[in-house]
Amino acid sequence: MTTQPKDTVQEGPGAVAPAALAPREPVQFDTRPLVRLFAERGETAAEEAVCTRLEEISLRLRRLERAFASHDLARIALSAERLGELAGAIGLTSVRAVARHVAEAARSGDGAALAATLARLTRVTDRSLAEIWDLED
């Protein structure tokens, strides 16, 4: 009888594929900033302001990813802080919190923590933006 090392994958009928990790966490919103914005500006102007902020958040996230690729820790920290401010202004509390964690990891110089928190920021931002767009529809 032959045995396979534990780190190999069996092939053929009855083979079990390794589990894929797909982290998923709920995103949190605070509707008060949006309620205030709509009350102050009216529906059309508020929708334009929200769309502009969502676009800025998306662009800022891409800049963060480029800064990470070039190992620019100072730019990562500043961009993450700005992204968090933009997110907080429209009630994206999960994005704001994770952006702060990215800035802290960049300032600490901990590459593993930075990579993990930036990946988390990407996931949370993508989910938050998708949920906001769903609310708009």
Image (spheres, rainbow, N blue to C red):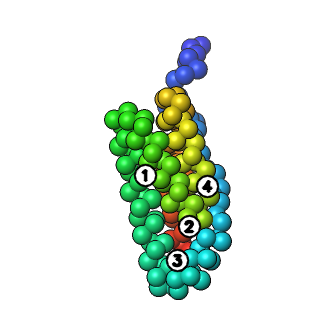
* Mark 3 to mark 4 CA distance (whole Å): 19 Å
Instruction: Give the labeled residue for mark 4.
Output: 94
Mark drawn on residue 136: 3
In the rendered image, is residue 17 in sight?
Answer: no
Q: Secondary structure at mark 1?
A: helix
| Residue appearing at x 56%, y 67% in the figure | 90
Instruction: Give the labeled residue for mark 2.
Output: 90
Q: Secondary structure at mark 2?
A: loop
User: 63 above or below 116?
Assistant: below
- Say left or right for 24 vs 69: right
Q: Are marks 3 and 1 in contact (CB under 8 Å)?
A: no
Q: Where is residue 85? Give x, y as percent.
A: 53, 57
| Residue appearing at x 48%, y 78% in the figure | 47
Residue type at numbered disc 2:
Ile
Give the number of the mark in front: 2 or 4.
2
| Residue appearing at x 53%, y 86% in the figure | 42
Mark drawn on residue 42: none
Q: Where is residue 69? Give x, y as percent.
A: 36, 37
Instruction: Give the labeled residue for mark 1.
Output: 61
Instruction: Pick whichever of labels 2 and 3 is earlier in the sequence.
Output: 2
Question: Badge 2: how crowded within 10 Å, few (<14), some, or many (20+)?
Answer: many
User: Closest to the observer: 97 or 7?
Assistant: 97
